[in-house]
Amino acid sequence: MAEQLRAFVEREPACFERATREGHITGSAWVVDEEGTSTLLTHHRKLNRWLQLGGHADGNPHVWDVALMEAREESGIDGCELISTDIFDIDIHVIPARGDDPEHLHYDVRYCARAPHRDYAVSHESHDLAWVAIDCIDDYTTEESMLRMARKWNELNNA
């Protein structure tokens, strides 16, 4: 996926703009609690799935800033901070057509962030939010990209 992302960025000068028909860059945050044992998931309103927090770059090439801003906006956790600006995960997935928006790809670049507390506020973009034990993430989702991030997190923290 990293090679596909690189090729997309190299061929598409407007890769950070949501109006790009093929797709666009998005930034997401794998938000963990202070202990690093739970992650904050959103029950995404439009997609009706439990996912990590994130959203559109809307022209911002600093995708780690996008991921952090989206995490803060979607969770109401102002003190949420990136653990690192290193890319944690990349996922390229199809977003189905909706209204006037045709089917397109999200080239999702994901970063790790830590929340200073477990209090949150559900935004209009979510049905709900939930702190989920990383070892129990498959109780909420069978999405391979979510399970992959859980495995990666556990590998990083059990090394």
Image: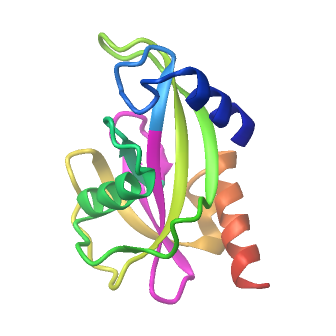
In the picture, measured across the screen, residue 134 lies left or right of residue 45, that is right
Residue 106 vs 57, above or below: the answer is above
Task: Please determine whether, in this image, residue 125 is positioned above or below residue 106.
Answer: below
Q: Position of residue 46 (x, y in %)?
A: 35, 34
| Relative to 39, residue 74 above or below | above
Q: Residue furthest right?
A: 159
Placement of 25 over or under 143, stated as above or below: above
Q: Position of residue 9 (x, y in %)?
A: 56, 31
* The quarter of the displayed image where residue 21 is located: top left
The magenta region covers 26-51
Image point 45% across, 81% down: which residue? 33
Residue 27, can we see it?
A: yes
Give the dominant element type of the magenta stretch: helix, strand or loop: strand
Question: Residue, x 59% and y 51% (percent of image)?
Answer: 141
Q: Nearer the viewer, residue 145 or 23?
A: 23
Residue 113's x, y, as percent?
Answer: 46, 71
Q: Nearer the viewer, residue 136 or 125?
A: 125
Q: Residue at x 38, y 78 (%)?
A: 115
Q: In this orientation, does residue 142 appear?
A: no
Image quadrant in which the N terminus is located: top right
For the C terminus, the quadrant is bottom right
